[in-house]
Image (cartoon, rainbow, N blue to C red):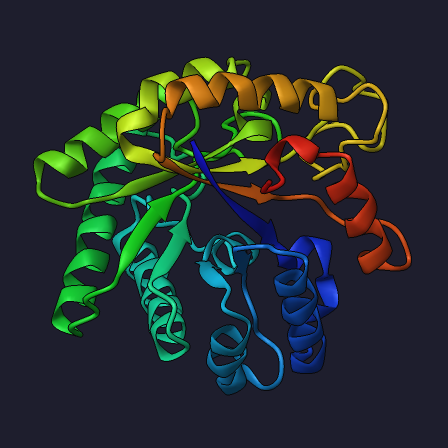
Amino acid sequence: MKIINSVCTSLVFPESRKKIDAFRAMAEFLSAKGMDSIEFYHDGDGRDKIGPILADTGLDPVYIAVIPSKEQKQHLCNIDEQARQAAVELHRSCIDEAQFNGIGRVMICSGAMMPDVEKGLESLGRSVEELFEYAAKKNYSNFVLTMEPCDTWMEAYQLIGPYARTKAFVETMRDKGLPLQLTMDAAHTVEEGENFFEAMQATKPYCNHIHFANCNITEKENPLYGDKHLGFEYPNTVWTPETLGTLVQQLHGLYPGDEPMRIGLEVLCREEDPYVYFEKMWASLPFIHKT
């Protein structure tokens, strides 16, 4: 497995979402640390400067349209047609923003659970098809659309979550000639009550991008229960550096040779200095460092 080291920077370095100087400082820092990729959404000042910063630092970017779609409750799977079209328009604007800054890869999620699952899946299929059609019409030749399954019952209440439903939906899109990809999330899968490696085995043909995210799902009274993007140092969480190391060994067997795997660290910094926090987190994960 050829690891592509990535960081979900809107969480680890939250100021970088709003301030272009913070974005540049973060990008230069991560590039110097040997990171290959960053995954982010930026809706602050200096958005026209993101492209040159990415070019200067050599980071391979992913634009996370999941963030505004969740925050604005714009669901691509909405069975209300007017609301679905509004969600598609938001995602088109994210694609345009990404392309303006030289970013081809855009991440989406399904949107919230609908009262009728099958109708929700039909709506989601129409939305995905319209996004691919839009990118083709605009001649965005490097366009890649990747979908992140979330949980269906704990926090996000998303339509696409269980890996069987996820796999079936992607296969339906592939049958239509739409090259939809997947970004599998280590926290969302276990929040769904499923085994992450089993989910990876099932979805491997469509997935070369994962998130290392963490959660506490055993202590309901804990204020950090659920999908809170905890660091791997937190007690009583699903993923620790040791369990992630075991997972990486399994993934090396599933993705042999030079098969690429982008591993995005998706952790919310709850400390004063995100740079110090990142250094500690990165030091705890030697099994994904390049040698």
Which image quadrant: the C terminus? top right
Which residue is located at x 24 percent, y 24 percent?
168
Residue 177, above or below 222: below
Which residue is located at x 68 percent, y 54 percent?
11
Nearer to us in this view, 91 or 142? 142
In this rendering, would 283 be left or right of 155?
A: right
Residue 191, above or below 70: above
Quarter-of-image position of residue 257 = top left
| Residue farthest toward the left in the current orientation of the protein | 176
In this rendering, would 265 be left or right of 202?
A: right
Which image quadrant: the N terminus? top left
| Residue farthest toward the front in the current orientation of the protein | 291
Which residue is located at x 29 percent, y 55 percent?
144
Nearer to us in this view, 22 or 54? 54
Which residue is located at x 62 percent, y 43 percent?
265
Residue 195, above or below 239: above
In this rendering, would 246 be left or right of 268?
A: left
On the image, the x and y values in percent for residue 54 come to: 50, 73
Nearer to us in this view, 277 or 106? 277
Quarter-of-image position of residue 245 = top right
Quarter-of-image position of residue 274 = bottom right
On the image, the x and y values in percent for residue 148 come to: 43, 40
| Residue farthest toward the right in the current orientation of the protein | 272
